[in-house]
Structure formats: structure tokens, C-alpha cells
């Protein structure tokens, strides 16, 4: 080695020794091999026993997830974390001058060795907060949990952003509205405290991701700021963007970062998020509108399965308005008598294509909207569930159906339908007073409980203990239960025995293919066999052709329903249809 090299090496060592950042070389189990004086200075006050033997142990009380973070890092080398904020509990009187927040970087050098870099980030944090506070009219606009601007703060900043004059090109502003996909689940299963910790970590990750924006400083937007605008909702405000796509790229990157695991105590949580993006370069937008439009796009991303973002377009707002309009109208639909039932006959399948027309009917609700005409249940049941109207609508449908059913019995005698099927939706099943309501309606109409069949979809029945208990309570009333749309949900033939149902309705998508797809025929056959072995009936839904009827009959289905026999028809038409069939 030449003398020049020696002295270069020596100055490097000197530099590392004197550097104003803490440098620590450690083994993968955290044992400290080497550290510079700045490292001792920062770490010593944190050590419980005055020893600096194991790095992870020293930081354990402040960053409990650190060991896991390192063991979860499966690559041979690379950056494990960068700029990770470690908050230090400042209640220690013995070291009043020590930092309140450290910034930690960890690099895996090889299979056995790590390098850690620590910086005092106290001033940085204080500065960030004071900049924020000075930009916000009052501290009341900061969220206490995350120290991010709250909704009012976000709106104030957005307002300033939208009021600013914009260059004709390359000067976009954007809002990203970000929402947890299933935050309630975290609170429900792990408790609110863990929920709060996740919120804090998400806020921190948003800050860090925006800070370490991969764009060169000159190209950075003039403002990149995260806010907490609701319990589990965040907004990111971006300004000075070159084009719309930049906002989408940032949204993609944020979602990617946010979906990495969060380590809280012993929990290793993975959350996904949905986001909506609005980007514009005109000032013709109100701050409230911007946030609302971003939220509309977010709701669409969530409805599409979550873990994705959608860019807002005008059509989304029109749809949302239409939906809101329907929601308002739906509130009056019941009292204005706009809801009515159609009935689709359910027939008993017999040999030679013959059928028993009086096996039953299924009530299918319709809404006669004063302007939009007839609206089908698929369009408004979801809205009714969301706005809390489903209970009232469900009761109305059941009551109308029971009255019609009892009327047929009086007028048609033995030719009247023997069973009345009525659909229940997800939200109805979780209503505590459902059983009482059903019981009261049956009694008021003078209908025997075992003539009523309540239909629930397969995916619903498979959910949770509460639903199971509700189903058992309904059964105890004496009503029959059917599993609707079987084959489209999650439960399988092997779990059919767990469900307290009397009848399985095989979904139309299977029946449609009966006669042309051997695969679907086998599935129908298997369903019928399993159902039978459990003492359950089977109904084939959506039979449209003689051939489909023959196939499902050959496979042992008891009953059928579909356009081949009758479309859904009015109550009066049911009487005529039955008379014709007799
Ligand atoms: P569902 O219970 O599976 O009802 C059968 C649906 O299939 C009905 O659609 C019916 O018109 C249709 N259908 C019957 N046979 C055929 C056929 O041969 N070919 C074709 N292409 N379609 C056939 P509808 O009336 O639009 O109802 C759709 C869904 O809305 C129902 O599916 C049910 O889940 C729900 N629904 C209907 N009424 C109510 C209600 O009062 N309350 C609740 N919660 N949901 C309801
Ligand atoms: Mg049904
Ligand atoms: Mg069905």
C-alpha cells in the first residue's frame, strides 16, 4: 500500500470518526461491532443498563418492530429502511438535551452484517410542524393523533391551492383521497389502540414517501402534503405538477408503499388502500368539490375490489348524483306506494317435461319511479342498504307478499301456490329485530310460518357467527330457509352441512349451461347429490329451455324456476296463470 493511499484511508477513518451522524456496524443479531463517537452519544442515553452491546436491544423500547423488520428482509444485501423516525420518550430528566426523534437508516451489507445510520431529527420534525402550523390558520386544524392537517386544515390548504393563478401548461394541482380498505376489521379484531398505531404509521409513511419523492428536487412539486381528513381517510395535496400522469404515478407509488407490512408489537399487519385522484390546471374548482370528487373516485376504486386507484372523471360524479337522487327518492317510495311485488312461479319438476305449477312463487320487488320508470332490485337494493332503508323496504315487501299469498289461498284453495319465497339482503340479516318483525308480519297476515321461505345468498350465509345465529333464530320461528344463487359464492359443497337451510337454489349461470357444458352438468349433479344427502331440496334457477329443464330433472332437481314457465308477473297475473295451468 502506498503512503498516499494510507493517508487517504486515514482521513476516511477520521471522517467517519468525527462525522456528525451516528454510524454503527452490527451483526445481524444486533451485536455492535463498531461505532463512532456520535453513535455513543446518541445511543448511550437510550441504553437501560448503560451498556452498548446490542443495537436492537437498546432501541427495543422505542422501535419494537426493528428486529422483525430486519429478519423479514430476505435479500442478501440492500437498504432495509431509510429515514425511519424513532420517537424517544422525553420524560427522562437525566438527559434533557438528548434528541426527541431519531431518523434511522439500516443497510444490509452482506448475509451477516448491517450498517446503521442515526441522525437527530428533532429539529427537522419541529420545523415541519411549525411550517405546517404557520400555514394553517390555527392549531385546531391539526389532527392530534398524526400531527397532520385535519379536514378543515386540508380544505384551507386546498383553497389556497385552487385560488392560485396557474401557468397555462405544466402547472397542475392534484388531490389524492386515500382510504383503508378494511380498517374496521383492524379495530374490531386488534382493538382501537392498535388501530390508532396503524393510523400513525400510515401517516408517517405518507410523510416519508412524499419526502423521498424520487423526482429530482427541481422537478418536485411546490407542495406535497398529507392530511388526515377522516377516521381512516387521508388526502395528499400536490401542486405544481408537470402533467396529470404525475399524480397517478405518485398515487401508484403511495399505494405500493402503504401496502407493505406494518409491524406493531407482535402483529405483522398488511393493509390495502383505495385511492381517488383528481388533477386539474384550472382555477374553476372549489376546494370542497375537489375533495369530494377525489372521494367519489376512491369509492369506485374500493367498489372495484380495493387496493387500487381511480382517476376521477365527470361520469363518476353524474353516477354519484344519480345515486344520491335515487337515494332521496327512495326515502319517499314507500309512503308514496311506489314499491310493488312481482311473483315468479316456482314449479315442481315432473317426468316428461311436465310440471306442478303450484309448488310456489318467489316475490321480486320493483320500484315504479315517477320519472325513471320501473327500477329493478339490483339497482336499488344496494342503495337501500347503504342509506338504512332496507329494513323498511324489506318489511314492506314481506308484508305485501304475505297478504297476496293469503289472498290466493282464499280464492284458489288447493290450486294456490304452496310456498312463498321472499329474498333477504345482507343488511336485513344483521338487523337485531328481524325475527320479531317477521313474526309480527306473519301473525298480522294470518300466515303459517312454514309456508314462508326466506332466501339468502350463498356468500352471505357463509359469513360469521352472528349471521349463523340469526339464521337459527329464523328457523326457530318455523320459517324455511333457502340458499340463493348457489355456486356463485364462497361456500363449497363440503360446507353445505354447516348451514341451517332447507333448500339450495342452483344459480342461473349453471343452469344456462346445462345441456351444453358437461362440466356444469357435473356440478349440478354433485350439488343435488350433496343437498339430498343432507335432506335439502334443490331448485334450478333460470330455466329457459325444455332441454335445460330435462337436464336438471334428470340430475334430480326437485323444482325449477325460469322464463320457460313464467317471467315474474303481477299478483293478479299469478291467479290467471295458475288457472290456465290447471
Ligand atoms: P334472485 O333471488 O336470484 O331472483 C331471480 C332473478 O332472476 C330475478 O331477477 C328474476 O327475474 C331472474 N330470472 C328468473 N328466471 C329467469 C330466466 O329464466 N332467465 C333470466 N335471464 N332471468 C331470470 P330480478 O327480479 O331482477 O331480481 C334480481 C335479484 O334481486 C334477485 O335475485 C334477488 O337477489 C334480488 N331481489 C329481488 N327482490 C328482492 C327483495 O324484495 N329484497 C331483496 N333483498 N332482494 C331482492
Ligand atoms: Mg331469490
Ligand atoms: Mg337467485
Image (cartoon, grey):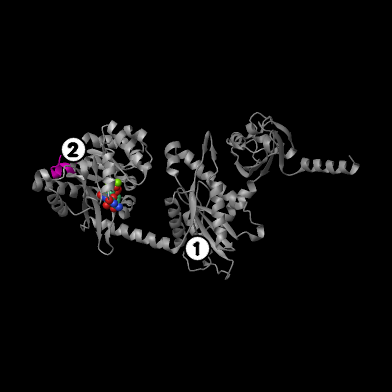
* Label 1 crowd (10 A; few <14 / some 14-19 / many >=20): some
Q: Nearer the viewer, mark 2 or mark 1?
A: 2
Magenta span of residues: 441-451
Question: x, y percentage for residue 252?
Answer: 55, 52
Give the SS element for disc 2: helix
Distance Cα–Cα, label 2 vs label 1: 61 Å
- SS majority, magenta: helix
Residue 459 x %, y %: 35, 42
Left or right: 354 as drawn, with respect to 179: left
Q: Are marks 2 and 1 in contact (CB under 8 Å)?
A: no
Please name the residue that numbered disc 2 is placed on.
450
Which image quadrant for residue 187? top left
* Label whose residue precedes the other's in the sequence (2 or 1): 1
> Foreground residue, 180 or 62?
180
Point 57% across, 50% down: residue? 207
As drawn, the residue found furthest toward the right would be 3
Give x and y (percent) for residue 115: 70, 38
Quadrant of the image for the N terminus?
top right
Q: For the point 60% across and 60% down, which residue is it?
A: 221
Q: Secondary structure at mark 1?
A: helix
Measured as percent of width and height from the top left, residue 217 is found at 66, 57
Q: Does residue 194 appear to the left or right of 425 in the view shown? A: right
Q: Residue at x 61, y 52 (%)?
A: 211
One can see residue 285 in this view: yes
Residue 433 visible somewhere in the drawing: no
Classify 10 Å Cα crowding around label 2: few (below 14), some (14-19), many (20 and above).
some
Amino acid at each position: 500500500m502506498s503512503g498516499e493511499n494510507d493517508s487517504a484511508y486515514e482521513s476516511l477513518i477520521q471522517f467517519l470518526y468525527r462525522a456528525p451522524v451516528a454510524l454503527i456496524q452490527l451483526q445481524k443479531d444486533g451485536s455492535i461491532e463498531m461505532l463512532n463517537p456520535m453513535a455513543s452519544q446518541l445511543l448511550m442515553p437510550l441504553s437501560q443498563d448503560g451498556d452498548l452491546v446490542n443495537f436492537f436491544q437498546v432501541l427495543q423500547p422505542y422501535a419494537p418492530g426493528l428486529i422483525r423488520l430486519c429478519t423479514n428482509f430476505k435479500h442478501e444485501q440492500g437498504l432495509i429502511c431509510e429515514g425511519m423516525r424513532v420517537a424517544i420518550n422525553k420524560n427522562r430528566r437525566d438527559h434533557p438535551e438528548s434528541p426527541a426523534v431519531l431518523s434511522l437508516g439500516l443497510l444490509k451489507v452482506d448475509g451477516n452484517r448491517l450498517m446503521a445510520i442515526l441522525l437527530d431529527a428533532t429539529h427537522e420534525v419541529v420545523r415541519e410542524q411549525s411550517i405546517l402550523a404557520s400555514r394553517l390558520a390555527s392549531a385546531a386544524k391539526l389532527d392530534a393523533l398524526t400531527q397532520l392537517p385535519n379536514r378543515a386544515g386540508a380544505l384551507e390548504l386546498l383553497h389556497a391551492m385552487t385560488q392560485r393563478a396557474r401557468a397555462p401548461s405544466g402547472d397542475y394541482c392534484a388531490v389524492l383521497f386515500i382510504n383503508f380498505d378494511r380498517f374496521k376489521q383492524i379495530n374490531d379484531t386488534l382493538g382501537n389502540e392498535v388501530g390508532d398505531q396503524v393510523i400513525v404509521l400510515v401517516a408517517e409513511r405518507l410523510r416519508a414517501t412524499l419526502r423521498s419523492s424520487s423526482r429530482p428536487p427541481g422537478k418536485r412539486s411546490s407542495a406535497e402534503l398529507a392530511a388526515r381528513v377522516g377516521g381512516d381517510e387521508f388526502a395528499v395535496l400536490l401542486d405544481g405538477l408537470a402533467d396529470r400522469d404525475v399524480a397517478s404515478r405518485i398515487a401508484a407509488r403511495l399505494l405500493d408503499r402503504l401496502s407493505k407490512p406494518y409491524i406493531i408489537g407482535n402483529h405483522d399487519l398488511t393493509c390495502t388502500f383505495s385511492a381517488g385522484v383528481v388533477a386539474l390546471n384550472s382555477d374553476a374548482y372549489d376546494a370542497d368539490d375537489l375533495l369530494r370528487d377525489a372521494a367519489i373516485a376512491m369509492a369506485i376504486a374500493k367498489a372495484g375490489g380495493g387496493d387500487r386507484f381511480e382517476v376521477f372523471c365527470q361520469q363518476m360524479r353524474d353516477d354519484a348524483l344519480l345515486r344520491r337522487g335515487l337515494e332521496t327518492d327512495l326515502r319517499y317510495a314507500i309512503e308514496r306506494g311506489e314499491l310493488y311485488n312481482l311473483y315468479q312461479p316456482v314449479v315442481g319438476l315432473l317426468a316428461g317435461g311436465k310440471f306442478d305449477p303450484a309448488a310456489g312463487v318467489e316475490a321480486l320487488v320493483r320500484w315504479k319511479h315517477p320519472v325513471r320508470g320501473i327500477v329493478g332490485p339490483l339497482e336499488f337494493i344496494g342503495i337501500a342498504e347503504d342509506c338504512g332503508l332496507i329494513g323498511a323496504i324489506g318489511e314492506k315487501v314481506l308484508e305485501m307478499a304475505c297478504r297476496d299469498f293469503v289472498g290466493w289461498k282464499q280464492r284458489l284453495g288447493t290450486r294456490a301456490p304452496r310456498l312463498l319465497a321472499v329474498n333477504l339482503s345482507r343488511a336485513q340479516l344483521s338487523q337485531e329485530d328481524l325475527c320479531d318483525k317477521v313474526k309480527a308480519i306473519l301473525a298480522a297476515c294470518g300466515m303459517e310460518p312454514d309456508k314462508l321461505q326466506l332466501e339468502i345468498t350463498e356468500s352471505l350465509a357463509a359469513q360469521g357467527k352472528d349471521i349463523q345465529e340469526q339464521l337459527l333464530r329464523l328457523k326457530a320461528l318455523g320459517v324455511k330457509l333457502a340458499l340463493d344463487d348457489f355456486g356463485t359464492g364462497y361456500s363449497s359443497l363440503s360446507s353445505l352441512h354447516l348451514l341451517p337451510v332447507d333448500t339450495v337454489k342452483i344459480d342461473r349461470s349453471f343452469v344456462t349451461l346445462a345441456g351444453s357444458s358437461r362440466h356444469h352438468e357435473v356440478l349440478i349433479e354433485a350439488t343435488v347429490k350433496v343437498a339430498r344427502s343432507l335432506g335439502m331440496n334443490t331448485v334450478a334457477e333460470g330455466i329457459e329451455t325444455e332441454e335445460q329443464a330435462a337436464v336438471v330433472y334428470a340430475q334430480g332437481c326437485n323444482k325449477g324456476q325460469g322464463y320457460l314457465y313464467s317471467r315474474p308477473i303481477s299478483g293478479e297475473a299469478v291467479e290467471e296463470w295458475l288457472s290456465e295451468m290447471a
